[in-house]
Amino acid sequence: MPETGGAAPVPPAALVAERWDAEYRLGRYAGEPPVAFVSTIVETLRARPALAARQGLYVGCGNGRNLLPLLDAGLSLIGLDVSAEALRQLAARRPERAGCLQHGDFLTFAPAAPVAYVIALQVLQHGRRAEAVRAFARVAELLAPGGLFFVRVNAASTEVYHRHAVLERHADGFTVEYQDGPKRGMAVHFYGRRELEALTADAFRPLRGPSEDVTQRTPPKTGAWAQWEAVYERR
């Protein structure tokens, strides 16, 4: 949701970009290893060489901690992100890969042809549930039948750490607006299993998962953060 105050409200999409630009300037993800799910993506595509040889789309590629290992594994990927700062850092690290990077919003991004697979790790959770519905529908639009969708999103079993207000509940999922922390003023969705199954039932069939990956926070932070991980095939 937009912030309020003396200045004009910031549109939600612009606020997301602004917050992530600031985070990347502060060193977000610098030196962090890729998430383990990256290995699942590589293994799954290597088992389907005809699909792996075609172009895929990585939504929310950031400054490359997950994108670069995928490119190094031989995948052909468009890296898309709303953060110009993240893309600047990524292009500086790998100038030879700059040509595959695109700055923009996934919901309005239109590739020249359908992509063979879509990768979205910890990104389709930004916004309210309505944005989640549109994002999952957009993935289905971008994939030809038989295309793969690799997704990792917030799970509703997460113990939300930063101060927040619950904006909405749907089935077994919910949306919060953070009131402090790096995502202050931003709406973020947490998916329940039944909700995730409903969002994918019409357009996809599950190949793997969804399964929960649970991470205990490092003290002095408390509680645990959970993510659904799944691989789907476009019907």
Image (cartoon, rainbow, N blue to C red):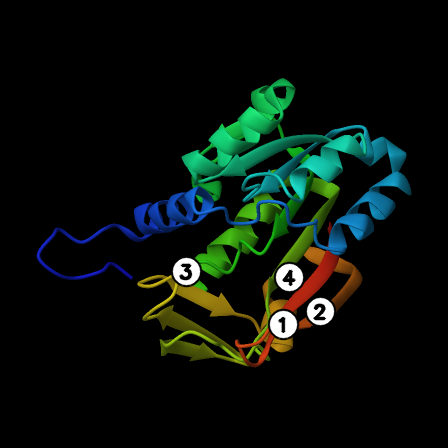
Marks 4/3 in contact by CB < 8 Å: the verdict is no
Q: Which image quarter: residue 47?
A: top right
Query: Which mark is first along the chain, 3 or 2?
Result: 3
Marks 2/4 in contact by CB < 8 Å: the verdict is no
Q: In this view, does 154 lie to the left or right of 232?
A: left
Residue at image coords 70%, 49%:
34
Location of mark 4 (residue)? 200
Specify the amino acid type for callout 3.
Gly
Q: Which mark is drawn over residue 226?
A: 1
- In the depicted view, which residue is nearer to us: 43 or 22? 22
Alpha-carbon span between mark 4 and mark 1: 19 Å
Q: Which image quarter: residue 205?
A: bottom right
- Circle 4 — which element? helix
Task: Name the image quarter holding the N terminus.
Answer: bottom left
Specify the amino acid type for callout 2.
Asp
Alpha-carbon span between mark 2 and mark 4: 19 Å
Location of mark 3 (residue)? 127
Q: How far across and how far down the image is residue 167, in percent? A: 35, 75
Tell which tag, 2 or 4, sits nearer the viewer. 2
Marks 1/2 in contact by CB < 8 Å: the verdict is yes
Query: Which mark is first along the chain, 1 or 3?
Result: 3
- In the depicted view, which residue is nearer to us: 149 or 96? 96
Please rate how many residues cluster around mark 3, counting C-alpha atoms within 10 Å: few if below 14, some from 14 to 19, many from 20: many
Specify the amino acid type for callout 4.
Thr
Tell which tag, 4 or 3, sits nearer the viewer. 3
Q: Is residue 122 left or right of residue 182?
A: right
- In the depicted view, which residue is nearer to us: 192 or 73? 73
Residue at image coords 54%, 42%:
62
Please rate how many residues cluster around mark 1, counting C-alpha atoms within 10 Å: few if below 14, some from 14 to 19, many from 20: many
Specify the amino acid type for callout 1.
Ala
- In the depicted view, which residue is nearer to us: 63 or 55? 63
Location of mark 2 (residue)? 213
